[in-house]
Image (tube, rainbow, N blue to C red):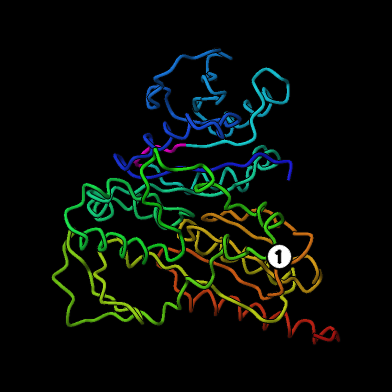
Amino acid sequence: MSRILVTVITGFLGSGKTTLLNTLLKHPDMSQAAVIVNEFGEIGIDYDLVEQSDENVIQLENGCLCCTVKGDLIDTFRDLYLQRKGGNIPWFDRVIIETTGIADPGPVLQIILSDPLVNTGYQLDGVITTVDAVNGGYSLDQFYESVKQVAVADRIVISKTDMVEGQNNLDAIKQRLRILNPSAPFIEKTPDNLDPSELFGDGIVHLETKKGDISAWLNPEHYQDQSTRQISESKTPQSNQNSPEAVYTAQGHQPVVHHAHDPLIQSFCIQRDTPISLDTLRLFFDGLAREAGPDLLRVKGIVHIAERPTHPAIIQGAQKIMHSIEWLKTWPSDDRRTRIVFITRGISQDHIEDSLGLIERLAERTARAAGQVV
């Protein structure tokens, strides 16, 4: 609870990240926030600076801090924390990182989740991705980084909706975003009408303060089984870099055209009704991280651990890095099932289920051989 919450704002070039951030910086609720950017010049500071804290940190009129990345994000996190603790800069209770437009957000998430110099003082709150409603489809077609940015988002801010010609075109991009990311809420307001509370509040810290609101963090009900999607071979167009690869039909939805990168992304939630042993969980994720590596885009879940039935385990990971287990004091609701959300590149739900099932069976046989009751 004492760690500083971190929000990552990502999105492709021209999608509205900087406009969104500029607007947030002027909001009174952001007066105790620190913002990490690549260059001050990317932030349209159109009001006077009241203090120059040092060569890398400036304080804005409403109290926000802006900090440039000094080559290494880990160093930037460390320096901000030490200056805050030493009273060299004003106190801040939140950090916002704006990534570059062509950045893969995975490495940033890895640093926040797993680097010991960072996660002792900071904690991931969520990922906000901006998508240009006019040019977003082209970015998704041409750049896999754009697809990843959408897939790992906790909130998706759709910009320039007023510039889209026809509701059908807007519906088409939203439908594509929804398949890439089944659970992230869409925000279509202009930055001037946005309140920071609509963007923040996705982290595990809120599971303690918002009892029973596990769905706000996981949204497991939004992840349909991948087996409900079927490829219509007869409608597959000729393959080229810019054309769709296949037409997918999901149960209860109209046919959806998937584009070049999209079929590689799979999002699903696995569930277990019976508790999982701590050793089984560790073996499963150790093996998965080694095998899947960068194709394991994001993982988050709540797990019923057999050894600690009254304290649910919270797990998070990005690519090949898994965060240390966090323990909640109590279950946030009466639902004590294990629920783990996976966002992967080319790794199916069946493969994940089979891998976990194999380790569970091996653990059961080992326990029986040792004369234990399972």
User: Amino acid type of disc 1?
Assistant: Pro
Foreground residue, 138 or 48?
Answer: 48
The reply to whether the magenta stretch includes residue 321 is no
Foreground residue, 13 or 285?
Answer: 13
Label 1 neighbour load within 10 Å: few <14, some 14-19, many 20+: some
In the image: residue 246, left or right of residue 148: left
Q: Give how far across and how far down residue 13 sits, in percent.
A: 30, 40
In the image: residue 20, left or right of residue 58: left
Q: Give how far across and how far down residue 274 sits, in percent.
A: 70, 81
Residue placed at 64% from the left, 38% from the top? 118
The image quarter containing residue 54 is: top right
Q: Give how far across and how far down residue 221 sits, in percent.
A: 52, 73
Magenta stretch prevailing secondary structure: loop
Residue placed at 43% from the left, 22% from the top? 40
Vertical placement of 252 versus 89: above or below?
below
Q: State the extent of the magenta-drawn residues as a range.
A: 98-102
Residue underneath mark 1: 332
Vertical placement of 119 versus 22: above or below?
below
